[in-house]
Amino acid sequence: MFGAAHFAGGPSLVVLATIGGIGYSLAYAATRRVEAAILTHFGANAIHFFGFTYPHLQA
């Protein structure tokens, strides 16, 4: 479902989001705390945001 929610980003994003969703579900399964999945998602977003360039955001 997480991958399908990213359908507008194209097929490659669907695949990557599906893999991410599996990771987030594993974080939840390991801890039984939704906060673990939320923090994992936040961490992945932070790595992506700070580790990659976004030319269209340049002022």
Image (spheres, grey):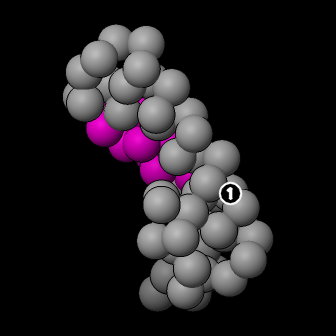
Q: Residue at x 37, y 25 (%)?
A: 28
Q: Is residue 45 left or right of residue 11?
A: left
Point out the residue furthest to the top here.
Answer: 31
Residue 14's quadrant in the figure? Answer: bottom right
Q: 58 left or right of 34?
A: right
Give the dominant element type of the magenta stretch: helix, strand or loop: helix
Please tell me which residue is depicted at 66% across the width and 69% down the height of the picture. Answer: 13
At 46% from the left and 71% from the top, the residue drawn is 5
Badge count = 1
Q: Amino acid at mark 1?
A: Leu
Judge by depth and name the residue closer to the eye, 55 or 8. 8
Residue toward you, 39 or 26? 26
Say above or below: 11 vs 49.
below
The crowd level at tag 1 (other Cα within 10 Å; few <14, some 14-19, many 20+) is some
Query: Is residue 2 found inside the magenta-colored segment of the image?
Result: no
Residue identified by numbered label 1: 16
Magenta stretch containing residue 45, yes or no? yes
What is the span of residues highlighted in magenta in the rendered image?
Answer: 38-48
Compared with 57, 45 (above or below) is above
Establish if 56 lies above or below 34: below
Is there any visible trace of residue 50 in the rendered image?
no
> Where is residue 11 shown, x and y percent of the image?
73, 77
- Residue 29 % position (x, y): 42, 20
